Image: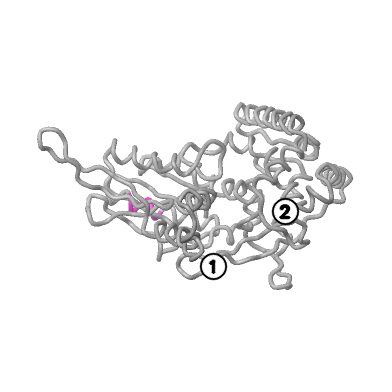
Amino acid sequence: MNARKANYAKEKARQLQRTLYLAAKEKPTRRFHALYDKIYREDIMTYAWKQIKANKGSAGIDRVTIQQITEEYGEKRFIQETCGQLRNGTYRPSPVRRVEIPKGDGRTRPLGIPTLRDRLVQMATKIVLEGIFEADFKDFSYGFRPKRGAHDAIQKIMTTVNEGKIYWVVDVDIKGYFDHISHEKLMMLVERRVNDRRVLKLIRGWLKAGIIKDDQFYESELGSPQGGVISPLLANIYLNYLDTIWEQQFSHIGTLVRYADDLVVLCYRKTEAMEAIRILRTVFTRLELEMNLEKSKLVNIWDDDVGFDFLGHHFRRLKVARKGGKEAHILRSFPSKKAMKKMRATVKEITGSRHLLHKKINDLIGELNPKKPRMEELLHPSG
């Protein structure tokens, strides 16, 4: 793909996002009705394809790979063909390919892999919709958002605890979040901002496309598959309902910090922490979600022996020496035992082979460096 054309497409896409963001910010109740034709604009599709290529990823149920598109089929042809399908109404979502990704505890995490064409259309739709919903998302939401990340969420926790009077932490896990999102309630939340029936039909199509696992088709009545390009945005739209209620009615109880479906509430008193648990469970019930009682916990961070894990970090309040021999308690963070175990396993996998004993240290470092993004992901998991 021509670099000049790709940069032009990127700038045009960002201009559109800024325009939609400002329009949504100016009118919080506005519903947007002319969006579908922007999705199949060639500059939007070109920028979407550039991002799909950068993300790499496996093939969907049709087994078509990025390499096949770039080397055999042709990128321009693929983009223009997809634009044409959207324009003339012949595009149809395909089922996702379900794979199971091993977790550190021996269990697996389901991942849904859409076809490349579905990923391209989802990315273009995400580009168009993201600015609109960014205008509604709250400052204490950090996951899967532009110019925000796990480091920001961690810093928010550190600052809130160390600069204020925080003694109790409600550490919350939502049971099987992505697999239990209600399609109907999600669409109701999307429709608060989107009034374009063709865009809504696209989103419903992806939600209802179904799953192929071991050559067997399964209908999808609930959930938004992890692995779908647009799933993180939809997941944030769904939990923004919680964020909005918390900001409007319950911010005095504690500080909410959310990264996708991982969240904590930082409170002054135990009574406030207990009230936060009650409120969260009530809102989860409205959203047809369930708090995972085995993984969720209430922590008194003034107890030096107790802490909590969040985004691959362990947080604990520890004593530090001050000038004049005084002591203070401040919150510190360091990689959690679970994250360190995963990182050690990754390094062992790379360095465990006996043939590496004959390699120079610089060559070994050369093999480890490409794995650095993966190790960062272990420290800051996205789901």
Could you tell whether 364 is left or right of 318 in the image?
A: right
Which residue is at the front of the view, 64 or 207? 64
Residue 201 point in image, percent of width and height: 76, 50
Residue at mark 2:
204
Pick out the residue farthest to the left: 325
Q: Secondary structure at mark 1?
A: strand
Q: Secondary structure at mark 2?
A: helix
Residue 211 point in image, percent of width and height: 70, 65
User: Against 198, is 101 above or below?
Assistant: below
Residue at mark 1:
108
User: Against 121, is 38 above or below?
Assistant: above
Q: Is residue 174 magenta?
A: no
Residue at image coords 48%, 36%: 139
Q: Which residues are magenta?
A: 273-278
User: Against 136, is 210 above or below?
Assistant: below
Which residue is at the front of the view, 110 or 261? 110
Residue 42 point in image, percent of width and height: 81, 36
Q: Is residue 277 magenta?
A: yes
Q: In which quadrant will I find the N terminus?
A: top right
